[in-house]
Image (cartoon, helix red, strand yellow):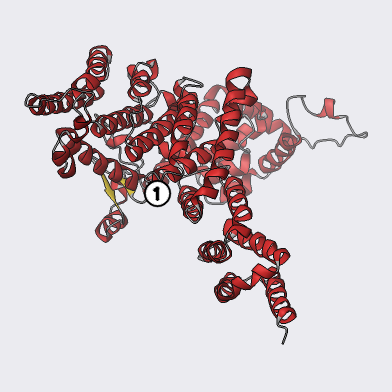
Amino acid sequence: MNYHHLAKSYLGNALYVLNQMTDTQMISFTLRRLKFSSVLLVAFPALLRKYIKVALHFWSTGEGVLPLVAFFFLRDICIRIGSDCLDDCFKGIYKAYVLNCHYVNAVKLQYIQFRANCVIELLGVDLPTAYQHAFVFIRQLAMILRDAITMKTKDSFRKVYEWKFMNCLELWTGAICTYSSEADLRPLAYPLTQIISGVARLVPTARYLPLRLRCVRMLNRIAASTGTFIPVSMLLLDMLEMKELDRPPTGGVGKAIDLRAELKVNKSTLKTRAFQEACVFSVVEELAEHLAQWSYSVAFFELSFIPAARLRSFCKTTKVERFRKQMRELIRWIESNSKFTNEKRMSITFVPNDPAAASFLEDEKKSGASPLSQYVATMREKARQRIDSLTESSVLVGEHSSVFRNKIPESDEDDDAVNEKGAVVFSSSWLPGGTPEAKPSKKEKKKRKAEHQEELASDEDVVEDLILSSDEDESSDDSSSDEDESPKPLPSKPQSNKQKRPPNLSKKKSKTKSSASDSSSKGNVDNAKPTPSKHHRKKQNAPANLSKMDLPSHAKKSKKRKISN
């Protein structure tokens, strides 16, 4: 019986279902079940290429456990089918990795590292085939760097100093370090080292210090895994001589910076204290890491002589005391390790080029007994804690200290709810010499505002009393009595606005004049009424925008009568 058409129908329908699905869990379930029948794809090369394409799509764009399930599916295909799909899988997964690493931040860094580990794991299925692809891809990186060195344009520099290029270097560094014991990928360590060193020296400015530190970390990893000496101390010591790290910061404290998620910083960040501390401490860590790799070498004294001398020079020239203290501590550990190796090599009989020199201090190396190894162990722990504090912990700034905690205790929340004046988290009182300023509550603000309004109202009443003086009252009494006795004739023609009121008076002021004349004609009726308050009288007689000097004489007379009553 021929099962060819049945298997093709089954695999084709399953592929169609995968392309139509949108639920992540259903796609993961289907890929897990198809893993057992993936060996049938050997007979269908067209379907095999389509399955590889679909699995790579889920691996690069999926969420949750789907990328991991898709990778296991690809790995099983490579193991079961072999050379028929290795080229497609290696090329496809590398291109998918490059497309997903254009941008990096502290959150996305973990996903990029996961995908890099998947690529490295897949390369281990067939190392001879992986070497051919790795050689081609590393050569592409070298050609991009060569164009940047020869052309020296912004576009060529930008192709090198971008996340895509740096993540590719990280990928091949991880691959060589993982399979350093194998003879297949080990020859690629030298060209990759040359590329990384060229990238670190391409633009030697302070703005690209995070990128240079990243290159130094990659070189230290290659040196530690392959056991070869890579001169990275000069790259680190040149950073200390830059003026941005040699002078005190002028840009304030600044925000905490994670150098792992940065390639370039702006000019304002260069002048902050946080950036300077992060760079100097990273230089100390990487230099100690480099020297600790050769702390058991018979030539450690000669190897560490120039770095120690330049560190002493930095201590003399730097104006930052905390940097000087950090460098002096590293110098003491270097001198202690030099004394440790010199005492051991006083009893040896072989010459430096003797193969027996490779076994020098071999037992001590296994136990980690050198002073620099112990110092580096403490430095790694501090670096891990600092990275954890940047990614996971919250910084609680109080009045006198800053504490790193994962969760705010309930007691602090209760205290904040009870005492509103104690909330100094975002104030300047935590700085040295700062004093906390108590902010007034809402009730106090309302009380002060009401008092201020009463003072303004009383000032206006005093102004009214001053305007209504006795001299003006005598002249206004005569004029107002004549006006009350004689009736006012009505105008025969409507007057223009210019004749009716001065140009500096509005319509509202003219209406106020008529209302004031009516109130003066009814003076007897007003005298019989109780005397209104000052605020009520002010609202009735004159609006807020009407000047007291513009009132007519009869209006002033009416005000005087009310005040006398």
What is the x, y in percent for residue 539? 59, 43
Query: Relative to 424, does residue 80 appear above or below in the rendering?
Result: below
Left or right: where 16 falls relative to 427: right
Which secondary structure, mark 1? helix
- What residue lies at 64% left-to-right and 61% top-to-bottom? 52
What is the x, y in percent for residue 523? 63, 43
Most extreme residue toward the bottom is 1
Left or right: where 224 falls relative to 45: left
Query: Relative to 522, does residue 207 appear above or below in the rendering?
Result: above
Hey, what amino acid is under mark 1? Answer: Lys
- What residue lies at 32% left-to-right and 36% top-to-bottom? 227
Q: Nearer the viewer, residue 439 or 560?
A: 439
Q: Nearer the viewer, residue 549 or 295?
A: 295
Q: Which residue is mark 1?
A: 442
Query: Relative to 43, does residue 122 appear above or below in the rendering?
Result: above
- Number of numbered labels in the structure image: 1
Most extreme residue toward the right is 493
- What residue lies at 30% left-to-right and 45% top-to-bottom? 384
Alpha-carbon neighbours of circle 1 within 10 Å: few (<14), some, or many (≥20)? few
Rendering quarter of residue 151 = top right
What is the x, y in percent for residue 160? 56, 30
Q: Nearer the viewer, residue 249 or 425?
A: 249
Q: Nearer the viewer, residue 556 or 33?
A: 33
Is any atom of residue 462 visible in this view? no
Rendering quarter of residue 317 = top left
Q: Quadrant of the N terminus?
A: bottom right
What is the x, y in percent for residue 376? 22, 37
- What residue lies at 72% left-to-right and 78% top-to-bottom? 4
Is any atom of residue 245 visible in this view? yes
